[in-house]
């Protein structure tokens, strides 16, 4: 009786037949039978099964199987299959390209091979010739004897899956013949094991070559955990460490001990994590000690090879020199953290560490630090008068001096423009912060030499001490800024410590800023108009628009609100709101017949003129609310004349081209000179009210007022005396032929409707 093996039934062990009968799939049958044979013959593990796609029947191959071929991926590799094929029958050597028809493969007679298998065998044989046809290989003689044994008989058969080779059985095969074949296999097991070990070494060598293909500049390492331990490295690996090819590497300890102490823990953790969990890659960057005792950045990656139980037995990988990349990263990090001009830390770095310090105060009651915030007095004048290049070199010289200040645990930064900040850590008490401020002041006591030219400047310093009350870095920086502002008010070149008094001032400023923002949002900004009289006729010919609010409390702090708005930038929106209201009111006044029309004055700060969109928005408003030439006068502070650069002159000339008159407000209180008045296109001077308060009690005050009036007339300018509160003051300035009078003696500021009614009444009377 025959079965699908092609063998007599009595030649098959009963247990084997039962296993075949209960299996449902070819691969499942093979697994079941392999386990069965392993149980029966644990020392040999000799049975392989093959399902022929050509014959659609199971066939059996008596050949050695070690370490469970179905579980070990290495035994399923193409090279191992071909080695088995060449060892099992010499006829495989005939599978070679046809010389006359290159690219086609001829199969030996009696061998049934699919074309796909033939092409694969041909390519493999061409590459691995010395491994496949080497008759001196261990086990070769036994394989030939097995192939020609009477028990085997027939020619081997290969299917398109390329998994296994089968030896077809003859009808004469008996159980005794099968036992004899098994005995031969058991005898040769030791020899075949040597062959498998040889093939294992070939595969390991191939794996090293695969690692080499990942990068020609990488150093290859191969670590056998042993025992005995072996750590094999390539010449390139040694070159990276500055070693010669002959320098011995005894074990992995020679590598690990070279790792920088600060990086060793990270490397050990990554290595152990990978060995314990295959899903975690071993990839780490660290510094390694070179032969010249210097450290260099390298990157190492590798993978562990594990046994059947999943335990690591070996590890291989590469090491790469990444010092160039690390240097580039360091340069990029330096650029991101430092000011390009001065080399000090930049604002972003400073604020980040200030935030960390503020947070640490809440976590550590023993931690104290101080913030010093300062800028240079009159730096804008230096920058504008001597040029931006000169100003930049001055900042660089100052930065070098700051870096030489005593003290270690600190951060010095340029925060922008001429603003600097210093964080002092490990602070014992407030005196240490004051000492630092004095050292900073000492830096500016000597002149700086820039391009063979000496220049002197000073710094106003604000100091804020750490406190749990601070919750954000911005709050502390704001208080230091307030302290600096206080120092400037005290006469510049000073330092001021933020205290309770300043805290009250900051609280009030915060309230005023919020109220101003709310007033803008609610459109509760008002303009009052104070008449300006012709000093000779006492007729109203001009008026000044003055800022007021619906909230009476805010009207008590007008000057402070304007200063805060300039500091915060709100002045830009506030200023355009005022200009628009004045233009609207000027259009209304044109309905009142007067020739020339009443001139409306309003204040414009230098901060507003610096706004890039100032003229764009101003031109848009003029198109919407046209005015007559000279109908509106813009009053500028005297300090604007300190900016002697061409840009400032050009800005004022553009205002004149738009038909605005220009006036210098509070003249005599600033630092302008006669040359400034000659250079700028000014129409009017307004004598500051302080020079009128003591025109009789203080001869000096009256003399200054008289000088300003006379100077204005010499330059062809009209002069307005503001703050006239007494008849004596009016008589005094009129005696010097002052052109216009403004003050409480005549009129207080009034709402627009009231001023319009007053103007109409005057026109009717005349």
Image (cartoon, rainbow, N blue to C red):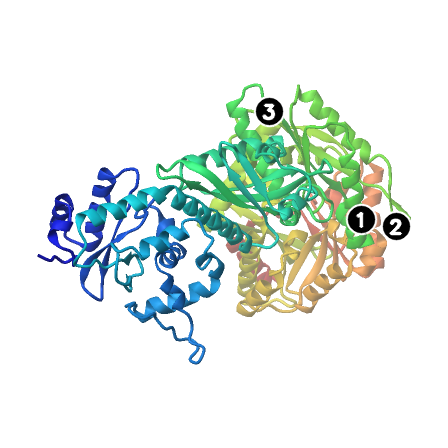
Q: Within the image, what quadrant is residue 364 found in?
A: top right
Residue 676 horizontal/vertical position (percent): 81, 55
Outermost residue, left side = 1
Q: Are marks 1 and 3 in contact (CB under 8 Å)?
A: no
| Quadrant showing the N terminus | bottom left
Q: What residue sits right under mark 3 in the picture?
A: 500
- Among numbered discs 1 and 3, the one appearing first in the sequence: 1
Tell me the number on the disc at residue 183: none
- Among numbered discs 3 and 2, the one appearing first in the sequence: 2
Q: What residue sits right under mark 1 in the picture?
A: 393
Q: Nearer the viewer, mark 1 or mark 3?
A: 1
Q: Are marks 2 and 1 in contact (CB under 8 Å)?
A: yes
Residue depicted at 54% across the width and 56% down the height: 213
Q: Nearer the viewer, mark 3 or mark 2?
A: 2
Residue depicted at 59% across the width and 65% down the height: 616
How many marks do you count on the picture? 3
Q: What residue sits right under mark 2 in the picture?
A: 451
């Amino acid at each position: 009786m025959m079965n699908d093996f092609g063998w007599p039934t009595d030649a098959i062990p009963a247990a084997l037949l039962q296993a075949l009968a209960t299996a449902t799939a070819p691969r499942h049958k093979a697994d079941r039978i392999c386990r069965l044979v392993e149980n029966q013959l644990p020392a040999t593990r000799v049975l392989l099964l093959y399902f022929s796609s050509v014959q659609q029947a199971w066939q059996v191959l008596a050949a050695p199987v070690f370490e469970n071929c179905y579980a070990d991926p290495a035994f399923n590799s193409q090279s191992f299959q071909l080695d088995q094929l060449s060892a099992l029958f010499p006829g495989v050597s005939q599978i070679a390209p046809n010389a006359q028809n290159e690219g086609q493969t001829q199969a030996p007679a009696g061998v049934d091979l699919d074309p796909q298998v033939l092409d694969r065998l041909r390519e493999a044989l061409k590459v691995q010739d010395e491994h496949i046809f080497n008759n001196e290989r261990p086990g070769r003689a036994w394989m030939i004897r097995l192939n020609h044994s009477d028990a085997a008989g027939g020619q081997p058969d290969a299917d398109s899956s390329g998994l296994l080779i089968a030896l077809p059985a003859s009808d004469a095969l008996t159980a005794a013949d099968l036992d004899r074949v098994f005995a031969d296999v058991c005898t040769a097991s030791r020899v075949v094991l040597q062959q498998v070990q040889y093939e294992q070494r070939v595969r390991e060598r191939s794996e090293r070559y695969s690692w080499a293909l990942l990068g020609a500049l990488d150093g290859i390492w191969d670590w056998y955990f042993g025992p005995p331990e072996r750590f094999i490295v390539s010449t390139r690996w040694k070159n990276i460490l500055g070693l010669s090819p002959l320098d011995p590497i005894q074990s992995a300890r020679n590598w690990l001990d070279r790792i920088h102490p600060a990086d060793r823990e990270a490397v050990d953790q990554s290595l152990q994590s990978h060995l314990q969990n295959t899903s975690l890659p071993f990839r780490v960057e660290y510094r390694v000690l070179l032969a010249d005792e210097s450290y260099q950045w390298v990157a190492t990656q590798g993978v562990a090879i594990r046994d059947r139980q999943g335990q690591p037995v070996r590890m291989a990988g590469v090491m790469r020199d990444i010092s160039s990349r690390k240097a580039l990263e360091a340069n990029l990090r330096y650029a991101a953290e430092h000011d390009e001009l001065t080399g000090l830390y930049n604002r972003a770095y400073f604020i980040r560490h200030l935030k960390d310090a503020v947070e640490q105060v809440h976590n550590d009651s023993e931690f104290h630090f101080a913030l010093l915030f300062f800028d240079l007095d009159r730096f804008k004048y230096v920058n504008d008068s001597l040029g931006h290049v000169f100003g930049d070199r001055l900042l660089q010289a100052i930065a070098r001096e700051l870096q030489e200040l005593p003290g270690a645990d600190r951060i010095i930064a340029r925060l922008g423009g001429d603003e600097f900040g210093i964080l002092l850590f490990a602070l014992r008490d407030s005196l240490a912060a004051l000492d630092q401020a004095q050292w900073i002041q000492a830096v500016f006591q000597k002149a700086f030499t820039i391009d063979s030219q000496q220049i002197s400047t000073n710094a106003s310093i604000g100091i804020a001490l750490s406190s749990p009350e601070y919750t954000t870095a911005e709050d502390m920086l704001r208080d230091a800024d307030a302290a600096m502002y206080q120092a400037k008010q005290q006469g510049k070149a000073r330092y001021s410590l933020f205290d309770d008094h300043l805290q009250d001032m900051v609280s009030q400023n915060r309230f005023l800023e919020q109220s101003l923002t709310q007033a803008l949002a609610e459109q509760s900004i008002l303009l009052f108009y104070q008449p300006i009289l012709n000093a000779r006729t006492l007729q109203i010919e001009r008026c000044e628009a003055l800022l007021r609010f619906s909230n009476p409390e805010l009207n008590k702090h007008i000057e402070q609100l304007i200063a805060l708005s300039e500091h915060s930038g709100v002045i830009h929106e506030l200023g355009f709101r005022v200009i628009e209201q004045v233009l609207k009111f000027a259009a209304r006044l044109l309905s009142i017949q007067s020739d020339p029309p009443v001139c409306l004055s309003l204040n414009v700060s230098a901060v507003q003129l610096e706004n890039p969109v100032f003229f764009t928005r101003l031109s848009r408003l003029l198109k919407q609310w046209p005015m007559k030439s000279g109908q509106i006068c813009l009053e500028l502070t005297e300090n604007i004349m300190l900016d002697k650069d061409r840009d400032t002159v050009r800005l004022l000339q553009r205002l004149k081209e738009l038909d605005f008159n220009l006036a210098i407000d509070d003249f005599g209180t600033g630092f302008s000179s006669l040359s400034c008045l000659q250079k700028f296109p000014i129409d009017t001077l307004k004598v500051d009210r302080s020079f009128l308060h003591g025109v009789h009690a203080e001869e000096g005050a009256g003399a200054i007022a008289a000088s300003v009036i006379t100077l204005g007339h010499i330059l062809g300018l009209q002069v307005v005396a503001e703050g006239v509160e007494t008849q004596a003051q009016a008589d005094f300035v009129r005696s010097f032929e002052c052109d216009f009078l403004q003050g409480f003696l005549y009129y207080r500021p009034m709402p627009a409707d009231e001023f319009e009614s007053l103007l109409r009444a005057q026109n009717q009377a005349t």
